[in-house]
Amino acid sequence: MRKKTVLVTGASSGTGKETAKTLIGEGYTVPLKSEENMSNKGCSQQSRPGLTRRKFIQNIALGGGALLLSSRWGLFSMAHAGEGETEYSMILVDYNKCTGCRTCETVCSAYNHPKKVNGKLLNGAGNPFLSNIKVYAFNPDVDVPAVCAMCPDNPCIEACPVDPDPATGRRALYRYSKTLAITNDPSRCIGCGSCAKACRVGVIIPHPETAKPERMCTLCNGEPQCVKYCPFGALSQVKVDTNQQFYAMKPEKIAEKLIAEWYGVSD
């Protein structure tokens, strides 16, 4: 008769020994494996040392998994795109957690406007005016951070009248190859303001002197500082989902909906 094999956690010590003895007496084969061996061989990626939560999420997406994100405003999904489909990521705001502290503005500005000090490139002063994410405050008390929605159909790029470069195929406004964030080539930009007019959220701001576009989210070269340093966990980097309830809305419209929900006030 063929014996059955049962793996008992901690079979080499304590209560596990007693369980192992009982099973052996009933004709089972019990390999003696320690907790340590099991944890080394059977652990999930999420529990491996050095694997960050964000990296774990990215691994799920790359493997074809799906991350479900729930919030007071409904359920939306982050799933692996089909073959050949481009994936864009964006900064998602949890308005229930945002306190309007503007830490995001400071760290964004500091990272994206570095300064050289004694020959070393260091983070800048963190002037909120230069930030690529802007927090709008409304009354009754609602704070709405506004940031590039990374629209998959690229309305700002499509609005750029500059002919695509024969070598790169890029207009003056294009997607940076590493992060796929919207980027401007100042050497080709004519400062017409078409991209700012086409921006759904209204985050593209022409420079007051050159009229060239600014304030587009750079995703901080793949590690958004606003997400990293938000003290309340109100910001996260996720795959673009155009079905999300507040996706690509102007801050005034978002505030209107939040005020009606939270305070029962509407125009």
Image (cartoon, rainbow, N blue to C red):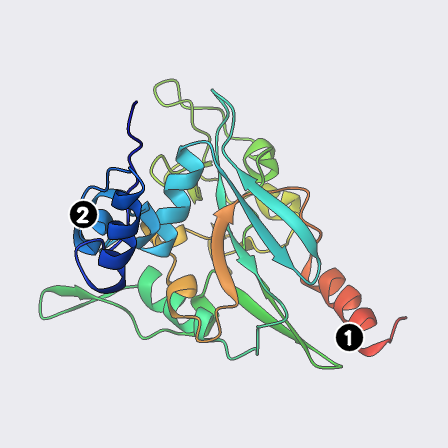
Q: Which mark is residue 33?
A: 2
> Where is residue 220 drawn, in percent x and y?
35, 54
Relative to 192, residue 111 above or below: below
Kind of residue at disc 1? Trp
Q: Earlier in the sequence, mark 1 or mark 2?
A: 2
Residue 104 falls left or right of residue 201: left
Q: Which mark is residue 112?
A: none
| Residue 212 visible to the viewer | no
Label 2 residue SS: loop
Tell me the residue that label 1 is attached to: 262
> Where is residue 29 drawn, in percent x and y?
24, 37
Relative to 39, residue 30 above or below: above
Q: Residue at x 33, y 38 (%)?
A: 178
Between 190 and 58, the residue placed more toward the observer is: 58
Between 107 and 70, the residue placed more toward the observer is: 70
Q: Residues within 10 Å of mark 2 (few under 14, many from 20)?
A: some
Relative to 32, residue 178 above or below: above
Q: Residue at x 63, y 71 (%)?
A: 96
Where is residue 142, by image quadrant? bottom right
Residue 191 falls left or right of residue 25: right
Q: Residue at x 49, y 33 (%)?
A: 80
> Where is residue 122 drawn, in percent x and y?
20, 67
**Distance CA(mark 1)–CA(mark 2):** 55 Å
Label 1 residue SS: helix
Total marks placed: 2
